[in-house]
Amino acid sequence: MLRKMLRAKIHRAVVTQCDPDYVGSITIDADLLRAVDIRPNEAVHVADIDNAERFETYVIRGEPGSGIIGVNGAAASLVKPGHRLIIMCYGFMQERELDAHESRIVVAGAGNKIERELRYPSLIDELEPTR
């Protein structure tokens, strides 16, 4: 059996631009992508903290250090610049992989720079995330 597990999360990234005329996707600063191992063209789920909208799209690599979080295409009508997002990426895992699995989490700070990096183990008996 495969389980769908959280693989990576960018927490509290702030939308810097919206472009409804772009052909879909979310543009994310490459420094954030690298920190959580999300690749360009990979599917992500996005939740808007400010209005509870949720959508799925794919990633486009933004310029490293730019702080860009650009929501494009139809999803641009769901969010606004300044909104805070949670960007989540999932992966399918075999049962035997679960005990060794840790989700990679980045909390974004001012300018969408990495404020904190966390790891969340998938072990039932380990309740606290490792820091």
Image: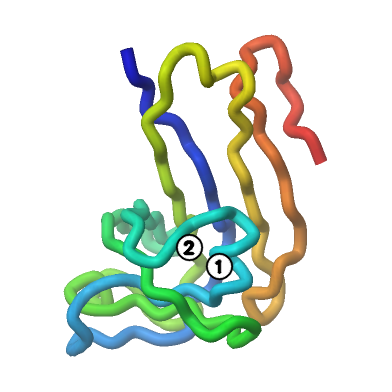
Disc 1 residue type (three-letter): Ala
Q: State the CA–CA distance, disc 1 to disc 2.
A: 5 Å
Is 100 in front, or is 131? 100
Is 50 in front, or is 110? 110
Question: What number is the disc on residue 57?
Answer: none
The image position of residue 19, as x and y in percent, is 28, 87
Disc 2 residue type (three-letter): Leu
Image quarter hosting the N terminus: top left
Residue labelled with disc 2: 85
Question: Is residue 120 positioned above or below 22 on the image?
Answer: above
Image quarter hosting the C terminus: top right
The image position of residue 74, as x and y in percent, is 17, 74
Looking at the image, residue 73 sits to the left or right of residue 87; the answer is left
The image position of residue 25, as x and y in percent, is 28, 71
Question: Is label 1 in contact with label 2 (beta carbons under 8 Å)?
Answer: yes
Mark 1: few/some/many CA within 10 Å (<14, 14-19, 20+) = many
Looking at the image, residue 69 sits to the left or right of residue 54; the answer is right
Q: Which of the marked residues, 1 or 2, is nearer the chain's N terminus?
A: 1
Q: Secondary structure at mark 1?
A: strand
Q: Secondary structure at mark 2?
A: strand
The image position of residue 118, as x and y in percent, is 72, 45
Is 70 in front, or is 58? 58
Mark 2: few/some/many CA within 10 Å (<14, 14-19, 20+) = many
Identify the residue at horizontal 62%, vertical 12% (top origin): 124
Residue labelled with disc 1: 13
